[in-house]
Image (tube, rainbow, N blue to C red):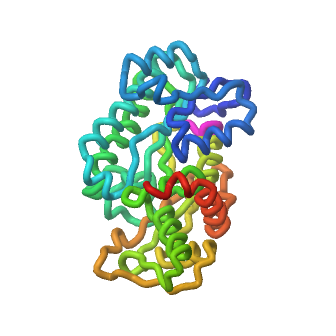
Amino acid sequence: MALGSTFDLSGKRVWVAGHRGMVGSAIVRRLEREGVAEILTTPRREVDLLDQTAVHAWVAGAKPDAAFIAAARVGGIHANDAYPAEFLYQNLMIGSNCINAAHQADVKKLLFLGSSCIYPKFAEQPISETSLLTGPLEPTNQWYAVAKIAGIKLCQAYRKQYGRDFISAMPTNLYGPGDNYHRENSHVIPATIRKVHEAKEAGADSFEIWGTGSAMREFMHVDDCADALVHIMQNYSDAAHINVGTGEDVTIEQMARTVAEVVGFKGRLTKDTTKPDGTPRKLMDVSKLRAMGWSPRYELKTGLQEAYRWFLAHRDSLRES
């Protein structure tokens, strides 16, 4: 396939690495509507993505036509800061093994997922694709960021040296079905959903958020992200990565109040202003994605309603985590 042309997924064998994660499972759901010949997955018990030999052998045998590399070790600020070696080593190995194996097996198109948190800590807002590597990283997640940047650069290297149609996308903050609700390692939306739900169950008269609540964040439903990634796979071919987001943001307080409304919690919202707000704002410039004719489907409240339904359906297994 010539670089720059469209890529039809129908009838293709498509590998989704990381299919059990929130993003990977959403990609699988989206591909099931696309008419692909087969969705290929690599369960951890069968293929350890940290094992180069195992990954190369599996990809050589499976012969995928296309690949979405959504596998990664992920976590919140606490996990990134507490386990720097694991976050750097494991994500370097996963990205390198998957991308190189795809090259060796002549996979026709590959999309590697980065993350908006790998942009410089003080990037100009909204954050454009050209902001990457223009300033210092956020110290608490620099280990994860370096590994993801390496994956993006590896795709560019195979593209430059071998003409591979390997591309990268940079999703914003995601939430939705399959999210992580761990008490210490979850991100802000699942953490808030769990906190508000437990406050309601306990009959509490309030719940608390960190900081002033004025920090602004962009949130994207994971099924919107998966839809955008499929659109990008089909219609985008360039060395530069492409941002994936909604292009809209809200304050943490607005998000928390919307969660309370969705959960049906009638109590007060309080603020622990001794805790940090973090970066004042983090919004993606999604003009390239919008110019490709794609736009999100979920409003924040609608997306949070779906996320809360998923949480309720799975809360028994999450209760002690």
In this picture, which residue range is highlighted in magenta?
A: 233-237
Name the image quarter holding residue 50: top left
Position of 212 compared to 146: left or right? right
Q: Is residue 263 magenta?
A: no
Q: Does residue 82 appear in the picture of this structure? A: yes
Residue shown at 39% from the left, 36% from the top: 151
Q: Residue 199 at x, y = what percent?
A: 50, 75
- Regarding residue 111, the answer to whether it shows in the image is no
Placement of the N terminus among the 4 image quadrants: top right
Of the pair 240 and 304, the residue shown nearer to us: 304
At x 42% / y 78%, what residue is drawn? 208
Residue 128 image offset from top left, x and y in percent: 45, 57
Residue depicted at 47% across the width and 74% down the height: 252
Magenta stretch: includes residue 235? yes
Total labels drawn: 0
**Where in the figure is residue 211, as x and y percent of width and height?**
36, 78
Q: Is residue 184 left or right of residue 34?
A: left
Image quadrant where residue 155 sits:
top left
Residue 234, how many percent across, how many down? 65, 37
